[in-house]
Image (cartoon, rainbow, N blue to C red):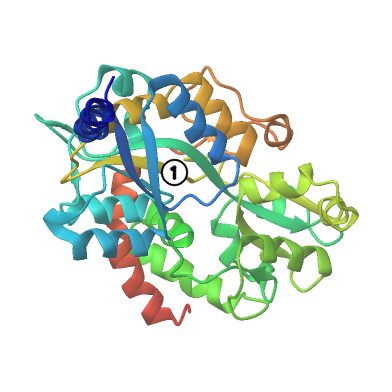
Amino acid sequence: MSIARSFFRLAASVLAVAALAPLAQAQERVLNLYSARHYQTDEALYADFTKATGIRINRVEADDAGILARLRAEGTASPADVILLVDAARLWRGEQDGLFQPVKSAVLEQRVPAQLRGGVSEQGTQWFGMSTRARVVVYDKSRFKASDVDTYEKLAGPAMKGQVCIRSGSHPYNLSLFGSLMEHLGPQATENWLKGLVANMARAPKGGDTDQIRAVASGECGVAITNSYYYARLARSTKPEDRAVVEKTGLAFPNQASWGTHVNISGAAVARNARNRDAAVQFLEYLASDSAQRYFADGNNEHPVVASVKPHTALAALGSFKAETVPIAKVGANTAQVQQMLDRVGFK
């Protein structure tokens, strides 16, 4: 075979491979995920989805507010397919701003309780809760007992003067709690409660939920409000200092004799301009599967939304509780009014 003929055959082969490359790239299944979840254990969650489906996940991480701001700025050019947020108020805000698109899925409607979903229309549901976390009260066992803090209302009573630690009132976790109370108590009673809570603070709001728990253990305050998974995380820790915090404190699920303890959610939605819509819906359905729900439970001490999946033993050890049943979308809708209340009562 002549050198010229060999060269032309090699060139033809190279050109053929080059021609197939764009086709292979076009056939690759990709999902663009904007996530406010920053938990290392979620890596396995995403990896298992890719392994099961062949769909590669491109992930952008920011906090809830940052993700919503980015979606607004990107508009119709946004590459986002799925949005994961960790608060009902922010999910409601995204829905109101038209950043999501409705989804019809028999799987999601069967597995996610109705009160943990967003707005519903003939086209489908705007977003779905995928895990929950209870907003609980932690107390100093040397000063108080569970019955002293068995309702949220008691935190604003005279017995708690100078005892309360809490993070910023404008943090989404607290806004959602306060929005829930507004559903139960009404606007005026909620504002009065907030005023009493401010009057009972041991110090100005600062830090995150774990900081509030540690402040109770150190004696800086007598009671604190926190999400349940932060406390379970300390209970699972092998560090002596974390174990000491748990030993010194107790945990109460408020309002068991009335409407139940407030729960917030981590939820998912399909982006308004999703280019990979089928893959996006498939991912949402995967998040509601037993295997993914166990990742939420075991990896980050969250309560699964699927009733058949049990929480991690560290979370279960905190006790069973009655959760409120107010639709979480209503809680989100109340937060704008709650923010005005916070400004009026001086809750930073």
Residue 264 % position (x, y):
46, 46
* Crowd rating for badge 1 (residues with CA inside 10 Å; few <14, some 14–19, many 20+): many
Between 156 and 11, the one nearer to me in the picture: 11
Q: Is residue 335 above or below residue 303?
A: below
Which residue is rendered at x = 60% and y = 75% of the image? 206
Residue extending furthest left? 122
Residue 272 % position (x, y):
17, 45
Q: Is residue 212 above or below residue 286?
A: below
Q: Visible in this render: residue 321?
A: no
Residue 329 % position (x, y):
29, 45
Residue extending furthest front? 2
Q: Visible in this render: residue 2?
A: yes
Between 266 and 202, the one nearer to me in the picture: 266
Which residue is rendered at x = 87% and y = 59% of the image? 142
Is residue 262 left or right of 15 when viewed as pictured? right
Kind of residue indicated by mark 1 = Ile
Q: Is residue 199 above or below residue 312?
A: below
Between 213 and 320, the one nearer to me in the picture: 213
Which residue is rendered at x = 54% and y = 40% of the image? 42
Residue beneath disc 1: 265
- Tell how many labels: 1
Between 89 and 66, the one nearer to me in the picture: 66
